[in-house]
Image: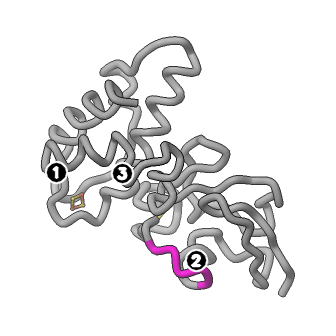
């Protein structure tokens, strides 16, 4: 066991687990933050998509030993606080378009969407269909059309 410190949803946390434990298990099983879902555990399904320092990443594929003390991890639970509201505009758009079916993939979809919009803005442009094509989050319920519509509306309010 060894101690690991990082920032989770705006608060510093410290856990005592082996270096090799993947961050998704630390979030879910040690810290009780269950928004990031377990789908595959091998960086394929993207159900666990969260943010590290504002960018999308998949905590199922990151060793907790590789997380730095100043890394800021944001999960869906902490997304509204990044805009100081009860819900992030992307979450509002998700509700407006009634996107979710079973819901399992949806936290990851929203986190991927927000990161994609930020990435486009960092390049000085708005999100385009080609950006949406790059999102690889799997939805076994096939809500892809509603996801794309919601991302465009959410982006317009970010
Ligand atoms: S659980 Fe992380 S990518 Fe599938
Ligand atoms: S809403 Fe069921 S997996 Fe996407």
* Alpha carbon separation for disc pair 3 and 2: 25 Å
Q: Is residue 142 left or right of residue 153?
A: left
Residue corresponding to mark 3: 87
**Pointer 1 residue Cβ closer than 8 Å to ligand 2:** yes
The image shows residue 57 at horizontal and vertical percentages of 57, 50
Look at the image and tell me in which quarter the N terminus lies.
Answer: bottom right
Residue corresponding to mark 1: 142
Q: Residue at x 31, y 59 (%)?
A: 105
Q: In this orientation, which residue lies closer to the viewer: 97 or 135?
A: 97
> Is the Cβ of the residue at disc 3 closer than 8 Å to that at disc 2?
no
From the image, give the main secondary structure of the stretch colored magenta.
Answer: loop
132 in relation to 80, above or below: above
The image shows residue 76 at horizontal and vertical percentages of 45, 58
Q: Residues within 10 Å of mark 3 (few under 14, many from 20)?
A: some
Colouring scheme applied when the structure was drawn: one colour
Q: Residue at x 54, y 12 (%)?
A: 124
Ligand 2 quadrant assignment: bottom left
| Residues shaded magenta | 30-34
* Alpha carbon separation for disc pair 3 and 1: 24 Å
Q: Residue at x 43, y 44 (%)?
A: 112
The image shows residue 107 at horizontal and vertical percentages of 37, 58
3 in relation to 64, above or below: below
Q: Is residue 34 visible?
A: yes
């Amino acid at each position: 066991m060894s101690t690991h410190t990082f920032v989770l949803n705006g608060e510093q946390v410290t856990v005592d687990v082996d270096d090799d434990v993947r961050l998704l298990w630390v979030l879910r099983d040690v810290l009780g933050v269950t928004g990031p879902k377990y789908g595959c555990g091998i960086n394929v399904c993207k159900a666990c998509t969260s943010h590290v320092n504002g960018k999308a990443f998949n905590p199922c594929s990151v060793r907790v030993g590789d997380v730095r003390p100043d890394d800021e991890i944001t999960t869906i639970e902490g997304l509204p606080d990044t805009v100081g509201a009860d819900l992030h505009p992307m979450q509002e758009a998700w509700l407006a378009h009634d996107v979710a079916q079973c819901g399992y993939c949806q936290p990851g979809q929203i986190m991927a969407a927000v990161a994609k919009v930020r990435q486009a803005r960092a390049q000085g442009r708005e999100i385009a269909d080609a950006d949406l094509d790059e999102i690889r989050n799997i939805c076994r319920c096939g809500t892809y059309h509603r996801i794309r519509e919601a991302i465009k509306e959410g982006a317009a309010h970010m």
